[in-house]
Amino acid sequence: MSRIQANLLLLLAAAIWGGGFVAQSTAMGHMEPNWYNALRFLLASLALLPFALYETRRAATPLTRRQRLGFVVTGIALFIAQTFQQFGLKYTTVTNASFLTGLYVVMVPVIAVAALRQKPHWIIWPAALACLIGILLLSGGSLSRLNGGDGLTMICALFFAVQITMTGRLMAGTPRPMTLAFIQFAVTAVCGLITAGALEPIRLADIENGLVQILYGGLLSSGAAFTLQIVGQRYTTAPQAAIFLSSEALFGALLGALLLGESLPFIGYMGCGLLFLAMLSVEIVPEWSRFRMASS
């Protein structure tokens, strides 16, 4: 798979996640956050299980203990990120949540430099800044009054940055995307079920009323989109992946405006333009640099 194809997969994942913001927000009218996460990731785990088993049977070598531990830790990071995001959506808007979750686009290259001693291509830094400004413009140029939900979403962004960074690291040495996706989903589902069972009430009617959101979150936002992310990250870097995945804010803001009546101001469209400019720059500039080096 080429890097362009991989980045297109990441863009598709971001589009699905944009719709997931709407599903997650409306699901809070039917059930508590931990139950929603537990049920949708349980569904995602079941959907990925056959693919993970098939991949395991075809693998030339079994996973090492270190690799299995890395998969589980990545799942824990995903659980923490999703939990903070889901609780944040109880108290903030889809547009604010889209912007604040998008902070991981800046956090990922910082983690790559600080923790992994990796040096991203120089275009990543201005592109990350452009993404951050673009996401801000999507919210109208200023956030509504910050509240506890916004703070929870900022913590969510940090753990999504950890999950993205670890996924890229693991996929570089372990080409087992379906297995990684399944383990991430299973860990998140188990942690969610334990937390929800201990802290939150649930009724069968709650599940029935939120079934559409559970199906979208489980099969598309979790099962399909996270798998696309993992497959795509086999062929691109974590900082570049973060740039493309950050376009979920664009899709989230647009769908929030269309489906929930949240307004998208004129400068929001300027934000869309900045996001696409950033995505094009991380695709074109490295290719142009390689072309110049090859021709010199």
Image (spheres, grey):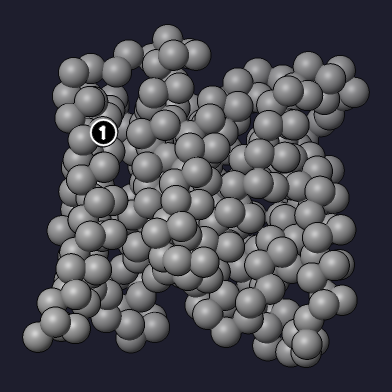
Q: How far across and down, in percent of the image, does residue 131 sit?
A: 25, 47
* Residue at 84% over, 20% down: 208
Q: Nearer the viewer, residue 243 or 23?
A: 243
* Residue at x 62% of width, y 40% of height: 221
Residue at the limit of the structure toward the left, as seen here: 296
Residue 153 drawn at (x, y percent): 44, 43
Q: Is residue 260 above or below residue 233?
A: above
Give 162 or 217, whichever is nearer the viewer.
217
Q: Nearer the viewer, residue 292 or 280?
A: 292
Considering every residue shown, the one lying at the far top of the view is 261
Above-or-below relation of 237 to 50: below
From the viewer's perspective, is 164 left or right of 117? right
Q: Residue at x 42, y 40 (%)?
A: 248
Please tell me whether mark 1 sits on a helix, a strand or a loop.
helix
**Rendering coords of residue 243 (x, y %):** 33, 54
Question: Does the image show residue 51?
Answer: yes
The kind of residue on which mark 1 rests is Cys
Q: Which residue is mark 1?
A: 272
Q: Is residue 45 left or right of residue 166?
A: right
Q: Could you say where residue 293 lies in the image, as x and y percent from the top left?
A: 15, 83
How many numbered discs sit on the rendered protein? 1
Residue 204 or residue 178, whichever sits in front: 178
Residue 210 vertical position relative to residue 169 in the rendered view, above or below: above
Q: Residue at x 75, y 61 (%)?
A: 182
State the image quarter where residue 36 is shown: top right
